[in-house]
Image (cartoon, rainbow, N blue to C red):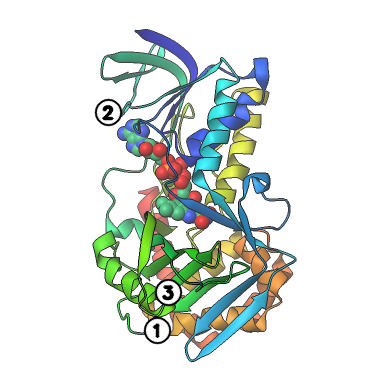
Amino acid sequence: MHSHVDLLILGGGCAGLSLASRLAEFGKDAPKVLIIEQRESYTNDRTWCFWDIEKPAYKSLTSHAWSKFEVANHPRSNVYNCSQYQYLMLESHHFYENALGLIRSNASIQLLLGQEVLSAPIKTEHGWYIKTGNLEFTAKQVLDTRPPKQVSHHYSVLWQSFVGYEIQTESDYFSPEQMVLMEFDHTFKSGLAFTYILPTTEKKALIEYTVFSENRMSEEDLMEGLKKSIGQHIAGSPYKILRVEHGILPMGNKLATQNNDSSYLFAGLFEGAARPSSGYAFQRIQSWANKCAHSMLANNTLYAFPKEKRLQSFMDGLFLNVIKKNPTIAASLFEDLFRRCNLKTVVKFMSDQASSSDCMQIIRALPPKPFIEALPRFIIQKISNRLRLTS
Ligand SMILES: Cc1cc2nc3c(=O)[nH]c(=O)nc-3n(C[C@H](O)[C@H](O)[C@H](O)COP(=O)(O)OP(=O)(O)OC[C@H]3O[C@@H](n4cnc5c(N)ncnc54)[C@H](O)[C@@H]3O)c2cc1C
């Protein structure tokens, strides 16, 4: 079988399906698209959370909203009321079902499951050529959302590694209207560690143990911290594991993939989707997918992830350097951020919507000393990255 399409999307995860969904909505104006995805089927493999500010995409598919959240830096703990900007939870299976429905509704968009793309597409006179198993395709343009096979530790300033269990308990231990954004673990010394708790009923919660560190951490590395934290929250009582989530997200990419051909674009988590200071990517992917789909419709051009806003990028980069140099003070910096800033400012900052005056409020709320100390190293790192990219 050999077919020719306008756009080949490699990887049908969040970025690939988001773009395909937006294109499917164009009806008969949609380009001819083929998505090649290695998984055989979609499961509820992750939970996406984001703040309800400025009409977030997919709000209507969310299954839980929290009006309060806790930041605990023992022995202190603060609970914040976020009823105006609730924290929303989107279970990935709802997102996948929605995307598959949109794709099925438009004959121009095809999804091929269970096909692993093993080699890079080759540019020929007929466009990009690719072979998977016994299938061959050519395409005018390629969007590659596959994560890199090998990622060096140096790719990112820090890594956010986490493992979580969705658990069911026998007695009531949770409050479904209040989540725990960060509960810091001061016993962990090689980075910043905290527990994140998303309770959906009194007896059910997703509990994640997260570490920001220079090295990527495996599920096994994180398991002891997770089990200890669960034990503390449910007083050592028995629980049933309903689901496991694990992820390693880049925080502050140092090297963007270079490609001078505008008909081949890299996208997704490792190509600018992840917010450097938090690793959050879902809403950034939606904003990009929307712009990319409209760019395809208007002038048949793929749209790359936009560069970070300057001030936000400077703040994120410096913040990561402070955490990297001194992870033990990071917990109190997060604590100060929530305690001293207006909640709307922090939520806007975390959701990529901060104005310059919001950024200034955040700068004023944090102690200057660790940032001034980290500044020379941060500037040297920026210059050496720029030299590496231009050489
Ligand atoms: C468990 C977890 C929880 C997260 N929670 C949040 C959150 O709460 N909020 C937030 O904003 N962000 C969150 N993120 C970060 C981010 O939103 C997700 O990682 C998101 O899925 C990134 O989208 P993507 O398309 O880049 O990668 P993916 O969704 O991982 O898609 C990549 C796709 O490529 C496919 N693929 C890979 N190699 C090949 C190949 N050789 N051939 C064919 N197909 C291939 C994969 O099977 C996959 O489907 C989370 C990430 C994880 C892992």
Q: From where the camera sits, is residue 162 visible?
A: no
Pick whichever, 3 or 209, lies toward us. Answer: 209
Q: Callout 1, which amino acid? A: Thr
Instruction: Identify the mark nearer the N-term, 3 or 1.
Output: 3
Q: Left or right: where does residue 277 sit relative to residue 62?
A: left
Q: Left or right: where does residue 171 sit relative to residue 121?
A: right
At 26% from the left and 19% from the top, the residue drawn is: 133
Q: Is residue 39 above or below residue 155?
A: above
Which residue bears the numbered disc 3? Answer: 194
Which residue bears the numbered disc 2? Answer: 119
Pick whichever, 197 or 351, lies toward us. Answer: 197
Which residue bears the numbered disc 1? Answer: 328
CA–CA distance in space, label 2 to label 1? 43 Å
Number of callouts? 3
Q: Is residue 93 above or below residue 132?
A: below
Q: Callout 3, which amino acid? A: Phe
In the figure, residue 305 lies in which quadrant? Answer: top right
Q: Position of residue 383 (x, y in %)?
A: 42, 63
CA–CA distance in space, label 3 to label 2? 39 Å
Q: Position of residue 122 (x, y in %)?
A: 33, 22
What crowding class fits label 1: few (fewer than 14 Cα within 10 Å), some (14-19), or many (20 or more)? Answer: some
Rendered-image quarter of ligand 1: top left
Quarter containing the N terminus: top left
